[in-house]
Image: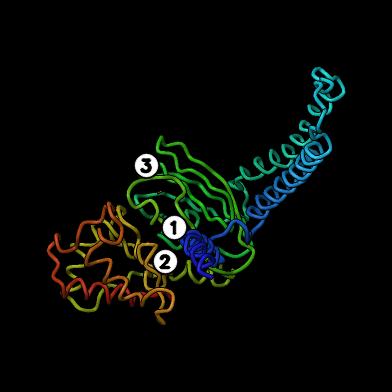
Amino acid sequence: MMKTWQAGKRLLPMTATFGLLLAGCGRQDLSVLRPQGPAAETSFDLMKLSIAIMIVVLLIVFSIAAYVLIRYRRKPGHDEIPKQIEGNFKLEVLWTVIPLILVIVLAVPTVKAVFAAGNDHSTDKNAIKVKVTGHQYWWEFEYPDYGVTTAQDLVIPAGKAIAFELGTADVLHSFWVPSLSGKMDTNPDGTVNRFSFSAPNEGVYRGKCAELCGPSHGLMEFKVKSVSEAEFTAWIDSMKAPAVMPEDPQVAEKFKSACLSCHAVGDQGGILGPNLTGIGSRESVAGILLNDDTGVDGAPIEDNLKTWLHDPQSVKPGNKMPDPKSLGLSEEEIDGIAEYLAGYKLN
Ligand code: CUA
């Protein structure tokens, strides 16, 4: 009994580690193993094919090895050197041709999938064009055909091909929505990368930056919201509506002077920071403080905005937003701006 307990105690850290690792699998929307669109399905099919081939090879090689180990064991009195087979033509051909066939079986669908992944749909009239710009540590999404720019929540119509054009405002990032598609880099040298994916099912999918880009790289999250065509049109319309300003004149004054030099709402403001139009309807604040009024999976948006605005560096170390207090905003004014932004919803 004691021994079992001792052994169990030693296994505890390992069990805990695996438990933690597997806990990450619970989020349906961040897994390449649960593909939610054709691009991700292709990658998943390739994974299944290569794993199947590996398992077959493993089984055959290990069975032969086990058989040889048992069948040709050295027996008592068996002292002569066994027959040497080096340079056996038949065997050499056999173990060159079989791997070659396996490599071809793997290569053909892989090369096909790689070229298909680069199919960018940029000239497809039915595709929705989105210009993605990576920033330390947030994502900007521009819809050039609609004259709309947003941040952190990429809203797309379900089932439509989205033609992405990717760039960066600073360093190398990588745009990745694991359940929908593979990764694509945003190059700092000014070259533009293009690719495309679609999300047939309505829902919210988590996106990540997949290239180390600074201290808050791991916090550079975004969401893809796949909605019906009608909802998408309504979203575009409300994004284009005139800007809503804070009702309180003092808060409005401060918001304009301190925030709008970098951020924009509607057609007013700057372009250095994330566009804040309709931020009250977003899935998160700063990409990682999840908005949830019930408090089960996150916190109410107003609380998240206050957390962010009172100390942006503690939420995302190294981000480029100045501390609002250093811009001359009082605690009350920061709370006022948080309340206004939380109430700035679309539709
Ligand atoms: Cu951006 Cu990592």
Mark 1 is surrounded, within 10 Å at the Cα level, by few (under 14), some (14 to 19) or many (20 or more) other residues, namely: few
Q: Secondary structure at mark 1?
A: loop
Please name which of the two marks, 3 or 2, marks the residue nearer to the observer. 3
Work out how far the residue at label 2 is from the one at label 1, CA to CA, in angstroms.
8 Å
Q: Is mark 2 within 8 Å of ligand 1?
A: no
Work out how far the residue at label 1 is from the one at label 3, CA to CA, in angstroms.
26 Å
Amino acid tagged 2: Lys
Residue 188, picture quadrant: top left
Q: In the rendered image, which residue does mark 1 sit on?
A: 147
Which one is nearer the viewer's eye here, 251 or 217? 217
Numbered circle sitting on residue 240: 2
Q: In the rendered image, which residue does mark 3 sit on?
A: 171
Q: Is 46 located above or below residue 245 in the figure?
A: above
Q: Where is residue 60? Give x, y as percent.
A: 79, 42
Q: Is residue 81 visible?
A: yes
Q: Is mark 3 within 8 Å of ligand 1?
A: yes
- The structure residue drawn at horizontal position 68% and vertical position 44%, both measured from the top left corner, is 113
The reply to whether discs 2 and 1 touch (Cβ–Cβ < 8 Å) is yes
Mark 3 is surrounded, within 10 Å at the Cα level, by few (under 14), some (14 to 19) or many (20 or more) other residues, namely: some
- The structure residue drawn at horizontal position 79% and vertical position 19%, both measured from the top left corner, is 86
Q: Where is residue 22? Give x, y as percent.
A: 54, 62
Q: Secondary structure at mark 2?
A: helix
The mark that comes first in sequence, 3 or 2, is: 3
Mark 2 is surrounded, within 10 Å at the Cα level, by few (under 14), some (14 to 19) or many (20 or more) other residues, namely: some
